[in-house]
Amino acid sequence: MTGKDIRFNRLFTNEENAVVVAVDHGMFDGPLPGMINLPEVVKKIDSGVDAVLLAPGMLAHCGHAFNYKGAPMAMVRVNWSSHFCFHWDYDEGISVPAINPADAVAAGADIILVCLTLKTGSEAGDASNIEVFCDLVNQAKKLGVPVLGEYFPARPDRLSPDELHEQIYRGCRVIAELGADLIKTFYTHKFNEVTEGCPIPILGLGAEKTPKQIQALELAERIVQGGGRGVVFGRNAIQVANPVAFQKALCDVVKRGVPAAEVVKTYGLEG
């Protein structure tokens, strides 16, 4: 068993599905409501989740979330991608390295995330994104660190459901072909096609904050029913009245198959 195997198996202990809480939004959006003081925010993350996704520079400030026995794994984003900057109206999907995997591991990362965007409208841009992705993946492999590949289309808000599905379906397979160990991406209306088209686990992301907590839990339910091996939820897991209660409910849905309607009652969450 390699170092990568050991780390990978920690994420899916006992072959359970994985729950990841994302707090890396400041890497693109600056401070967001509910995520202003990140060291305090991570104290609201339940120890039952499997990993926390954050930006490389915040790992040193949030070490208390990872420095005890049974703590969540530290998952670090290692490239910066312009397509997340919706507030600047960027839409070309340019990716550049933010930190090399060796430095991320030295800082405490257990898993690294590398994002990929294709079909940007520029062949040169797509090729450059592939080059950045492959270089970071190959560096991580030499270190024995699992790679979570993220497929994220440029301006997904402009895509129809069928267009989004087509990009996710093809993009996830590309990421698998390029050597990622697991994938984070959007849920689509034919998500089972996405999961069946890849030989590696796929985690569905939470995307925009839902008006009601039960809607986020129902999304998690659909992701798992569609063959997803877990979720990566950020705003839906943090920007709520009781983050720990929501995260416990999320773990019940994702790991134990408890219906969303049931966990809402169990944990006293507002619908």
Image (cartoon, grey):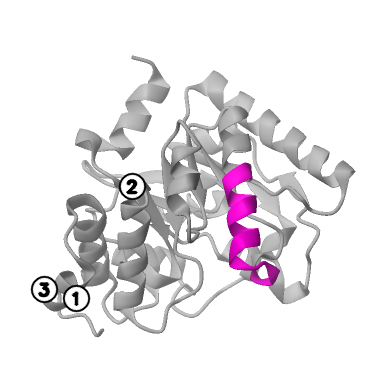
Q: Residue furthest top?
A: 1
Mark 1 is surrounded, within 10 Å at the Cα level, by few (under 14), some (14 to 19) or many (20 or more) other residues, namely some
Question: Residue 216 in the image: x percent, y percent?
Answer: 36, 71
Nearest the viewer among 261 and 162 is 162
Nearest the viewer among 51 and 196 is 196
Mark 3 is surrounded, within 10 Å at the Cα level, by few (under 14), some (14 to 19) or many (20 or more) other residues, namely few
Q: Is residue 119 left or right of residue 176?
A: right
Under circle 3, the secondary element is: helix
Under circle 2, the secondary element is: loop
The residue segment tinted magenta is 157-170
Residue at the disc numbered 3: 266
Q: Which of pointers 2 and 1 lies earlier in the amino acid sequence?
A: 2
Q: Name the kind of residue labelled 3 in the image.
A: Thr
Q: Is residue 53 visible?
A: no
Which residue is found at the position 58% from the left and 37% from the top?
173
Under circle 1, the secondary element is: helix
Q: Is residue 74 left or right of residue 132?
A: left
- Predominant SS along the magenta part: helix
The part of the image, by quadrant, that contains residue 223 is: bottom left
- Work out whether 134 lies above or below 143: below
- Work out whether 153 lies above or below 217: above
Residue at the disc numbered 1: 264
Q: CA distance from mark 2 to mark 1?
A: 28 Å
Q: CA distance from mark 3 to mark 1?
A: 6 Å
Question: Residue 253 in the image: x percent, y percent?
Answer: 23, 60
Callout in the foreground (3, 2): 3
Which residue is found at the position 29% from the left and 34% from the top?
10
Question: Residue 97 in the image: x percent, y percent?
Answer: 71, 42
Residue at the disc numbered 2: 66
